[in-house]
Image (spheres, rainbow, N blue to C red):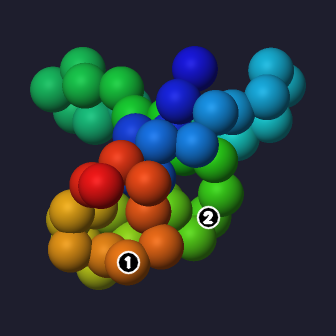
Amino acid sequence: MKCSFCGKEIEPGTGIMYVRNDGKIFYFCSSKCEKNMLKLGRKPKKVEWVRKGK
């Protein structure tokens, strides 16, 4: 599976799964990606270090 923020491949048994109240599931490879998306509200297209927006 891939990280919902940066698009990096996540190894089985690692990463973070976040489930919103509406049932939408997000997978994150690191706490860095989780914080950038959920807490800081950043968009992957506007962050330089992500592969997903390119």
Q: Is residue 31 visible?
A: yes
Q: Residues within 10 Å of mark 2 (few under 14, many from 20)?
A: few
Residue 7: x percent and y percent? 47, 42
Give the residue pinned by disc 2. Answer: 31
Judge depth for marks 2 and 1 and give the one in front. 1
Task: In this rendered view, identify the residue nearer to me: 11 or 27.
Answer: 11
Q: Earlier in the sequence, mark 2 or mark 1?
A: 2
Q: Position of residue 21 (x, y in %)?
A: 22, 33
Which residue has dot 1 on it? 48
The residues tagged by marks 2 and 1 sit, at their Cα atoms, a distance apart of 17 Å
Q: Which residue is found at the position 36% from the left and 48% from the top?
A: 52
Q: Is residue 53 above or below residue 25?
A: below
Residue farthest to the front, as pictured: 54
Q: Amino acid at mark 1?
A: Glu
Give the left or right position of residue 12, taking residue 22 as reference.
Answer: right
In the image, 29: left or right of 45? right
Residue 31 image offset from top left, x and y in percent: 62, 64
